[in-house]
């Protein structure tokens, strides 16, 4: 990605697959986070939650996981 081999890199670019930031707004149903909280996201951000690996709390082995780096979400976006 840093060399733009996939032709979608936007510069300036900081390579990595974990994300950190600060919450800037929350929805009315959000209970665990508030504006100003520091947050982080690991490499695997979603899983099917129905396979044996997910049932065993091994989401990183889920065959349908979603990652932060170049993957589409399960809804296709």
Image (cartoon, rainbow, N blue to C red):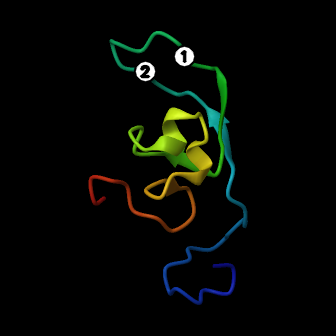
Mark 2 or mark 1, earlier in chain: 2
Q: Residue at x 36, y 19 (%)?
A: 27
Tag nearer the camera, 2 or 1? 1
From this view, report whether residue 9 is shown above or below residue 67.
below
User: 76 or 22: which is nearer to us?
Assistant: 76
| Residue 14 position by quadrant | bottom right
Provide the residue designation for mark 2: 26
Q: Residue furthest front?
A: 52
Q: Residue furthest left?
A: 75
Q: Where is residue 55 drawn, in percent x and y?
A: 50, 34
Indicate left or right for 73 with 67 as reference.
left
Indicate left or right for 19 with 72 as reference.
right
Q: Where is residue 59 drawn, in percent x and y?
A: 56, 43
Q: Residue at x 47, y 58 (%)?
A: 63
From this view, report whether residue 35 is shown above or below residue 51.
above
Provide the residue designation for mark 1: 33
User: 20 or 57: which is nearer to us?
Assistant: 57
Q: Which mark is residue 47?
A: none
Q: Where is residue 12 drawn, in percent x and y?
A: 67, 70
């Amino acid at each position: 990605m840093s060399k733009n081999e996939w032709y979608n890199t936007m510069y300036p670019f900081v390579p990595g697959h974990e994300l950190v930031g600060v919450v800037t707004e929350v929805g009315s149903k959000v209970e665990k986070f508030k504006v100003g909280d520091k947050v982080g996201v690991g490499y695997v951000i979603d899983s099917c939650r129905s396979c044996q690996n997910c049932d065993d709390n091994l989401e990183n082995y889920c065959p349908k996981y979603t990652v932060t780096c170049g993957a589409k979400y399960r809804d296709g976006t």
